[in-house]
């Protein structure tokens, strides 16, 4: 599983990519203001995101 912080035009979201024998599954958080997206990213890295 991999995560990406995607940022464009003052907005951001987090993309999760899961690879398995069944294929690739991509899911994304909603687009957020960059400050909110960065806080979500930090929570993910610290293990606090849900």
Image (cartoon, rainbow, N blue to C red):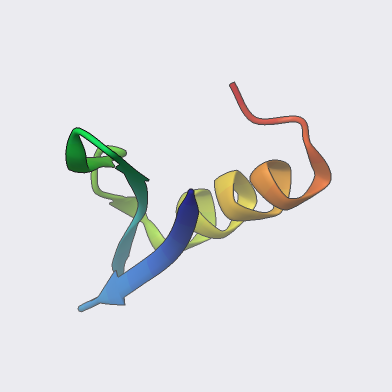
Q: Image quadrant for the C terminus?
A: top right
Q: Quadrant of residue 22?
A: top left
Q: Residue at x 44, y 65 (%)?
A: 5
Apparent side of residue 32 relative to residue 9 in the rendered image (left or right): right
Could you tell me how many numbered marks the image carries? 0
Task: Report x, y in % for residue 15.
Answer: 33, 52
Q: 36 or 26: nearer the eye?
A: 26
Q: 50 or 35: nearer the eye?
A: 50
Q: 14 or 24: nearer the eye?
A: 24
Q: 20 or 26: nearer the eye?
A: 20
Residue ranking furthest to the bottom: 9
Task: Report x, y in % for residue 35.
Answer: 52, 59
Q: Residue at x 73, y 52 (%)?
A: 45
Q: Quadrant of residue 47?
A: top right
Residue 23 lies, with reference to residue 35, above or below; the image says above
Residue ranking furthest to the right: 46
Apparent side of residue 10 relative to residue 39 in the rendered image (left or right): left
Residue ranking furthest to the front: 21
Apparent side of residue 44 relative to residue 18 in the rendered image (left or right): right
């Amino acid at each position: 599983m991999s995560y990406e912080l995607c940022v464009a035009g003052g907005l951001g979201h987090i993309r999760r990519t899961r690879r398995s024998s069944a294929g690739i599954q991509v899911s994304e958080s909603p687009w957020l203001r960059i400050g909110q997206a960065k806080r979500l990213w930090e929570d993910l890295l610290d293990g606090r995101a849900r």
